[in-house]
Image: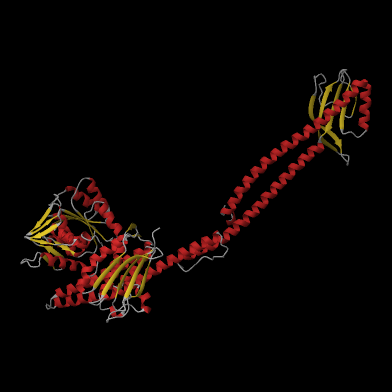
Amino acid sequence: MRILIIEDDIEAAEAMSRGLSEASYDCVHAADGAAGLAEAQKGGFDVLIVDRMMPKMNGVEVVSTLRREGDATPVLFLSALGEVGDRVDGLKAGADDYLVKPYAFPELIARVEALSRRRETGAVATTLKVGDLEMNLIARTVHRGSTEIDLQPREFQLLEFMMRHAGQSVTRTMLLEKVWEYHFDPQTNVIDVHISRLRSKIDKGFDRQMLQTVRGAGYRLDP
Amino acid sequence: MRLPRIFRTTPFRLTLLFLAMFAAAAAAFLAYAYLATAGEVTRRADDEIRREMNSLEAIYRRGGVSSLNQALIERAVGERPFLYLLLDTRGERITGSIEESPIGDIEAPGENWTTFQVTDTDMDGGEVKRPARGMQERLTGGETLFVGADVGESEGFVTGIVRALWGAGALVILLGLAGGVLVSRNVSRHMAGLNDTIAAVRAGDLKARARVRGARDEYDELAEGLNEMLDRLERSMGGLRHAGDAIAHDLRSPLTRLRARMESALIEVEAGKGDPKQALIQALDDADNVLTTFNAVLAIARLQAAGSAPDQTLFDPGQLAADMAELYEPLCEEKGIDFKAELIPQLTVKAARPILAQALANVIDNAIKYTPPGGAVMMRVRRRSSGEIEFSITDNGPGVPLEDRARVVQRFVRLENSRSEPGSGLGLSLVAAVAEAHGGRLELDEGPGVYDGFGPGLRVALVLPRVE
């Protein structure tokens, strides 16, 4: 997996590179918007990490130029601006996800992972299958083996998200953003409680626990 | 060369403009009056001359040259204001009050008119030339008769009128200029007050205010507007300064802790003993706390700076509350708190949904945090009789004493017994800032009261204005 980091803060970029390399990603760094755009135009990247505020060309310009040229490489936007309006601007320009600085490293890795995998599952599926867990998106039913599992609408959405990102760590913030569509730090463990409810429904009475807690990061659904 | 200040003011320039317009109008009026009056005077003189000529011709027809000659001599003696000249067929003077005809050509047919000057002696014996009109006609017998009239007096009348008009015009312009100076001095005086205030503020005195004289005129309006603006500016500057102090105060302790922890970890690692991991985990925790506080302060500051929440839309408040209830209900259940929601459906509220959601989350979060297991939290959405939309969250935890209620909304205020709970002390201030950014308010009241070891509880209401 190759990642292009377009970030003018050299130290932050180096830290990011180091961390992503440890998670076995190949990183290329560009130190300003123009250089980053040139590098991105060469192609061959799985994810672009683009800082919003940079000299020469800002992140929004880089991303919208790439999108105009038909480049659909997933983009993770990084910004110190976390207001709703800033977020909307970034997403409008064509970014796929938005992360506010400063961020926890597991959060960055989880989002990059989610973006890099997203490409591989392009087709519109009517069922999702992870291990012996099967979800029918049309009938909105869930089975584990032969047992039908009864879920509330939100639990269904939560499980769907976990299944689409099976094998990846997803963070609490990602869940709050993608499943509940809230963009604030809830401060208490609201998400944990929802996960533990879901866990009791899909894992209780089974030998193998599918819904794992990843220490310091969040959760993972294992097949 | 720079003009004196008074001449550079807008009112003075306006005065000049009006004066110029007035002068142009006056000149046009003057020209018209002159032409009309002067024309009238000439016409009248001409009429009189023609009548005299007619009467003399009648005398000539009846009695010939001798009667006319007689009549002319009589008339010259009797103070008639006419000038006469009778010439014989060869153009020689027979009689008359002037020596020769101003119209020399006696052969010219019909009647001939002229304007000429007569020389007269005034009372001091000096010569004066006065304007005159006259006509000349060939009589039937071949003689030539000239009748003229001194129009000096009438002309003088016209000249007098013109002079008076010029005088009046000059007077008006003088008065106008004086008025302009007065008005502009008056305006300048008022503006100077405002400008002084602005200069004082620019120089850093945020307390400077313009004087409102109570005349309820546009200067007062301007001064009031300026003062209001300065009040707001001062408040937000004060808020910023307070936020700065508060950030310094609240961030200093976790930052100090963080620093100490890292320092001791470093010493331990250098000494080759101890596991730095625990210290690092705690340091990360501290850093996260600092960031949380920082984000909350920033969010409040932005809301206050923006004045009103951005991107407001119309939506059903019950729906938002139901979403929040759905998010928090499992948390209550886990903590053994009874959670109920009473939501009036199909109301409309205008708000920035994500910001309002965050505010409600803060309130619910607080309620759950401070309600002991076995207690209850109740969320309601309703419309007040005033049309305002009220979100209220009531718990039966320990509540907040009356004297502390206003205080807990302020930034960083945490009551003694809440220090053990995690939190930045910014939750309710953020809620208050959100309410204000929507033109609403935050109300804190006592909950359901004391019973079964619970209570008295706290009721937090976020009241948003009615949608027109």
Residue B56 percent across, percent down from the top left? 88, 25
Give B334 or B78, whichever is nearer the viewer. B334
Q: Quadrant of the C terminus of chain B?
A: bottom left
Residue B105 percent across, percent down from the top left? 81, 21
Q: Is residue A157 visible?
A: yes
Q: Is residue B2 visible?
A: no
Viewed as shown, does residue A151 lie left or right of B149? Answer: left
Viewed as shown, does residue A219 lie left or right of B44? Answer: left
Task: Report the label total.
Answer: 0
Residue at point 72%, 44% (across, down): B165
Residue A3 percent across, percent down from the top left? 16, 55
Residue at point 61%, 48% (across, down): B18
Give the quarter of the image for residue B375: bottom left
Give B96 or B307, whichever is nearer the viewer. B307
Give A67 or A178, whichever is nearer the viewer. A178
Give the quarter of the image for residue B367: bottom left
Residue B300 percent across, percent down from the top left? 33, 66
Residue at point 27%, 78% (across, down): B419
Viewed as shown, does residue B80 lie left or right of B111? Answer: right
Give A202 or B83, whichever is nearer the viewer. A202
Viewed as shown, does residue B358 lie left or right of A46? Answer: right
Q: Which residue lies furthest to the left in this view?
A: A207
Question: What is the image's colouring?
Answer: secondary structure
